[in-house]
Amino acid sequence: MAALADELAGQAEIEELRRSLLSTQRRLAKAKAKRDELAEVTVDACRDAVLSHWKPAPIKAPKVARGKRAEHALIHATDWQGAKRTTSYDSDVMRRRVMLLADKVDRLIIDQRASRPVPDCTLLLGGDMIEGLFNFPTQPYEIDATLFGQYVTVSALLVDLVRRLLATFGSVSVIAEWGNHGRLGSKRAAVPRADNADRMTYELARQILAGESRVHWNDCPEDVQHVEIGNYRAILLHGDEIGRNGFASPSTIVSHVSRWQSGSFGWDFRDAYIGHYHTHNEWALPNGRGSVYQTGSTESDNRYAGVMLASSATPSQRMHLIDPEKGRVTCGWKVWLDE
């Protein structure tokens, strides 16, 4: 009888524990649902708050001629290193130089339109638009804004650049590529490559400009982008994709791009645009038609490049004119940005 009583008491205790567990699970599920709902509402509210507070006024479309001989402007803007701080560079200098780029593009286009129409523009964003925090140990001491500040400041500058270009061109197509400075965590961190702060910065700017019908801007989940302007086809990459630890010699870069061009990339293209090295160069591809175009940076006084690589460069970006019918670059400029 005693054994039976103990067994019944044990079953009652198990049943009570089971009811308690089920009750706890229901409360946890309810709490999780509330938490998820709260998180979703919070994200939506933050986005809506940004967009409602920062809703740009429409830019009046310029009167631009169009015709059979029209060419297309291509601007390669890359390696702004937003919030990098050196003796000659910081976020304010970055902003002045980017807007100087827009002003010089406008002046160049006015001159070129005297001989043929240049109605539209494609803006290539080459990556490392922000400085980041996770690339080398002393990086947090060489910035004037945290990662959050970089995200906001550079997004605002991207919006301002595109809006300034809308005053010059009938339409602006943006093709964005993310760089190694946007990496979240160390190289060994288990973070997908596409979860990149550059890409997040692009997305905020893209959302802010979503109501502008003359801007065409898609997300960039892949790390090499396709550029297509009429019959012109090129690829946009940051530059760290080639070589070990993000460094490669010019001959290695040309050889790698040439192998891609021969079919291993799976998409036929003529030219390649890269940044990453903060210097302006051009190398012919072995097929005798295409080139690798390497573009400089808005940054100056890079101590790492000067000490580790014995390299320095004057701030610059790049502009080309494209013949959409013949599918090639017709002319180009190294746009100096030193003040």
Image (cartoon, grey):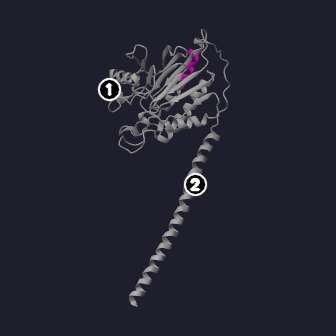
Q: Which residue is mark 2?
A: 38
Q: Position of residue 99 (x, y in %)?
A: 55, 25
> Mark 2: few, some, or many residues within 10 Å (few <14, many ≥20)?
few
Q: Position of residue 289 (x, y in %)?
A: 43, 14
Q: Is residue 117 left or right of residue 187?
A: right
Rendering quarter of residue 307:
top left
Residue at position x 39%, y 17% in the image: 285
Q: Secondary structure at mark 1?
A: loop
Judge depth for marks 2 and 1 and give the one in front: 2
Counting labels gives: 2
Give the dominant element type of the magenta stretch: helix, strand or loop.
helix
Pick the front one: 286 or 41:
286
* 243 within the magenta span: no
Q: Position of residue 316 (x, y in %)?
A: 46, 21
Q: Which residues are magenta?
A: 99-108
Look at the picture and state if 109 lies above or below 163. Answer: above
Pick the front one: 160 or 89:
160
Q: Is residue 104 visible?
A: no
Screen quadrant of the N terminus: bottom left
Pick the front one: 273 or 208:
273
Q: Position of residue 235 (x, y in %)?
A: 46, 25
